[in-house]
Structures are given as C-alpha cells and as structure tokens.
Amino acid sequence: MSPMSYAFFRGDYVPLSEAKVSIMTHALHYGTGVFEGIRGNWNEENGAIYIFRLREHYERLLRGCRLLMLDIPYSLEELCNITVEMVERCGFSEDLYIRPLAYKSAEKVANLKLQDLESDFCLLAVPFGSYLGTDILRCCTSSWRRVDDPMIPARFKISGIYVNSILAKTEATLAGFDEAIILNQDGHVCEGSGENLFLVSDGKIYTPPIEDNVLPGITRDTVMQLAQSELGLEVLETHIDRSQIYISDECFLTGTAAHLTPVVEVDNRKINDGTVGPISAKLQKLYFDIVVGRNPKYIHWCTVATPRLVSV
Ligand SMILES: Cc1ncc(COP(=O)(O)O)c(C=O)c1O
C-alpha cells in the first residue's frame, strides 16, 4: 500500500477521487460554504504528523456555520477525531494541507434562503509544501478593497468571499509581485490575500484589529502570544495606514499556508534595508519549532497523527 489522499465525504472515508458532488450543488453556484485551512507538519524524528491548533480551526469553522446556517451533524470533538483518523489513513510521511468544508449541499438553484437548504461537511488532505513559493516577499497594495462586515463578514472563512482575495492575488502576481496587501473601505491596511499583516516599529509590534475586516487568523494569534510571552514585546492592535508600512522597521505576513514570511519590499519601496529583520527572524524560528512539535512548552497546540496504511 502506498500513501494516498482520502476524503471524508457523506459520512465515510473514501479515496479523494471518489468524492464528487452534483453540478446542482448550491455552494458551487453561490459560494455558500465555510472552510478551513489546517496544516499537518511531518516530524521525521518522531514519525508523526503534528496538526497545528486543530481545535481552534474547528471553533472558527463552527462560528462561520452559525452565520451561514450550516447545520452539520458533528461536534467539535468529532470533527477533530475525524480529521486525525483521515490523516492517519492517508499514510503520508510529509507535510499536509487539510481542508475541511461545511457547505450547502442542497441540489437546488434559484433559491437564496439559507433556511431552505440542507448542509453537509467534507474534509480532504493533500501533500503540501511551500504556499508562497518564496522565503521573502515583494508585495504591492491591491486596487481591490476588502469587503466590509455589512457586506460579507471577513471574520469567517466563507467560500464566496475568497473571490475578493483571488482578484487581489491575481492582480499582484500578474504585475510581478508575490502577494497583495489589501486595504479596507476606510483605506486602512487590512491583510494579505490569505495572510494577516504585522509591522515592527521601534521595538513594538502592530497589526490591524479584527474590526478592520481582517480574518482572526490562528497564526496571527500564535505570533501575538509568542511576541509577548517569549520576546517580551508589546503587541498593539491598531489601524495601520499604508504609509506606515513604508517606514516600518520590519513587516511580515502570517497564515497557516504562508507560515510567517518576511516582507522585504512593498510598492517598490524597500522595508528598512530590504533584508529580513531580527524580530521577524526570531518569531519565525520559534514558530517553525512549535508547529512540528519540537517545543514542549507549546506541545498542547499540536495534535499528533501517526500515519498508517489501510486497504481500500
Ligand atoms: C484572508 C486571510 N487572512 C488571514 C489568514 C490567516 O489565517 P490563519 O492563520 O488562521 O491561517 C488567512 C488564511 O486562511 C486568510 O485566508
């Protein structure tokens, strides 16, 4: 048996290639889903995959389900157990990306009433390496603005909202940049297309507050805690103007897929001397040790899955 991707689909574990939905599916047309992006990090020494902050990802997913009236028949505990079981069954000995999705599975079009539509939950895992494809980032400010809470709340990972991120990311990469920085309707700095944003200025750390329409990132929370408790730095959640990025000492983006990645240039202006700053480097080192289960103090953030090979 060799490792292969499985899906949890309609209540069962099936090979990923067998998990298929009808083209009538509501979520396919209207983006009526809430998803998560979770990383499973392979630890060679221990022969295990460390799933980072699994509970917190499902807590966020379940909050989004409330907004979209997605009734899924699994508790937080069950969702965590299903995920570990699926990762173990896949049998991969490498880093994984784990994608849960709660969605309106009703095969109905021309119906915009959430209360009329049945829901389902599915999950898949695939091998995953670098998301951004580079260790340092050159970013641009996007001409697209982040959606406001009264339009579609950005605090949940709603499938349909990602068209906003996709427009920004596409624009940035076609213009030769690695990532987009998106402003909100007020013109304040919001986040990257799939990452939260941090600045370091005069030894303090700054990041936009959730109310500025940013996703309450789990990596964001991790980095805020580490900056305070491990480096003794003050972390301020405050509005950030675009020009503050240009004159910051350091800038970095955080996300499950992106990890903690330093930004060395924004809008063709170097951040400081255009190299990775010391605080970004220290936080990155701490973070990388923690996510593969190498720091006993933070091992409670990791859920261990031991790959095994099963017959189909
Ligand atoms: C828009 C957006 N902001 C921020 C993040 C970072 O969130 P997390 O650290 O929970 O992955 C993501 C990643 O999913 C995202 O899509």
Image (cartoon, rainbow, N blue to C red):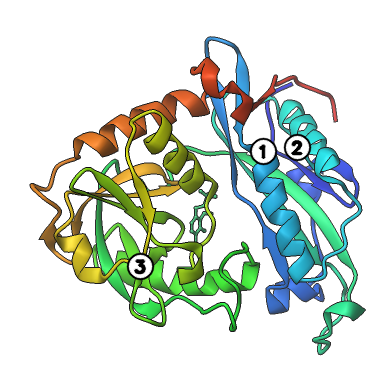
Q: Residue at x 90, y 70 (%)?
A: 118
Which residue in the protein does label 2 denote?
83
**Real-space Cα separation, disc 1 to disc 2, in angstroms:** 9 Å
Label 1 or label 3, whichever lies nearer to me, is 3
**Could you tell me which secondary element the residue under label 3 belongs to?**
loop
Q: Earlier in the sequence, mark 1 or mark 2?
A: 1
For residue 276, side relative to residue 294 (left or right): left
Q: Is mark 2 within 8 Å of ligand 1?
A: no
Which residue in the protein does label 3 denote?
239
Q: Residue at x 58, y 22 (%)?
A: 299
Label 2 or label 3, whichever lies nearer to me, is 3
In the rendered structure, are the residues bearing label 1 and label 2 in contact, judged by CB atoms less than 8 Å apart? Answer: yes
- Say which quarter of the image contains residue 14: top right
Residue 294 is situated, as x and y percent measured from the top left of the image, at 49, 17
Label 1 or label 2, whichever lies nearer to me, is 1
Q: Is residue 282 above or below residue 111?
A: above
Query: Dot 3: within a 10 Å radius of its alpha carbon, few (fewer than 14), some, or many (20 or more) residues?
Result: some
Locate the N terminus by quadrant.
top right
For residue 248, side relative to residue 38 (left or right): left
Which amino acid type is marked by label 2?
Thr
**Could you tell me which secondary element the residue under label 2 belongs to?**
helix
**Could you tell me which secondary element the residue under label 1 belongs to?**
helix
Residue extending farthest to the top is: 45
Q: Residue at x 26, y 60 (%)?
A: 139
Q: Is mark 3 within 8 Å of ligand 1?
A: no
Which residue in the protein does label 1 denote?
54
Residue 121 is situated, as x and y percent measured from the top left of the image, at 82, 55
Locate the C terminus by quadrant.
top right
Q: Is residue 282 above or below residue 64?
A: above
**Real-space Cα separation, disc 1 to disc 3, in angstroms:** 29 Å
Residue 7, visible in the rendered structure: yes
Which amino acid type is marked by label 3?
His
